[in-house]
Amino acid sequence: MTTSITLYILLIYNVLVNMNHTVPVYIKTPYITLGQFLKYTGIAPNGGQVKTILHDTPVMVNGVIEQRRGKKLYVQDQIQINATNYQIQTKG
């Protein structure tokens, strides 16, 4: 019984730690569109899937739900999708 409680606590801890983890996405240009972001990160396997993902999956950009694939993402923008946080950063 104690082992299962310990495992449950570890599971909850891992979920909470991963929720606060931010994945950096490096770009060389001044901005990247949301559609390009989804393809670049591998969330969308191809351009045809971007529209479907944006329609079916809540995507938050800086705390606001966003469905426009042409939305420009700039350095320091925060994106949350599928319980993963991303931040746009410059590469250089």
Image (spheres, rainbow, N blue to C red):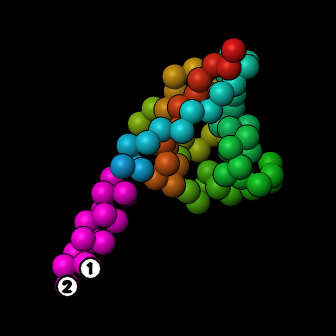
Residue ID at (73%, 18%): 29
Q: Quadrant of the N terminus?
A: bottom left
In the image: residue 43, left or right of residue 3:
right
Mark 1 sits on what residue?
4
Q: Are marks 1 and 2 in contact (CB under 8 Å)?
A: yes
- Position in image of residue 14 (x %, y %): 37, 57
Query: Toward the viewer: 79 or 5?
Result: 5
Q: Quadrant of the C terminus?
A: top right
* Closest to the observer, 51 or 24: 24
Q: Is residue 53 visible?
A: yes
Q: Residue at x 80, y 52 (%)?
A: 46
Question: For residue 13: magenta?
Answer: yes
Residue linked to disc 2 = 1
Residue 60: image tag: none
Quick one: label 1, few (<14), some, or many (20+) residues within 10 Å?
A: few
Relative to 19, is 8 on the left or the right? left
- What's the residue type where badge 2 is placed? Met
Residue 27 in the image: above or below residue 20: above
| Residue 66 coordinates in the image, percent (x, y) | 54, 41
Image position, residue 44 (x, y; %): 71, 52
- Give the residue furthest to the front: 3
Q: Can residue 71 be seen at all in this image of the molecule?
A: no
Of 51 and 30, nearer the camera is 30
Most frequent secondary structure within the magenta stretch: helix
Question: From the viewer's perspective, is 73 left or right of 39?
Answer: left
Answer few, some or many: residues within 10 Å of disc 2's Cα (few below 14, many 20 plus, some between 14 and 19): few
Q: CA distance from mark 1 to mark 2?
A: 5 Å
* Range shown magenta: 1-16
Q: Secondary structure at mark 1?
A: helix
| In the depicted structure, whether residue 47 falls above or below residue 8 | above
Residue drawn 57% across the image and 33% down it: 24
Look at 36% across and 49% down and name the residue there: 17
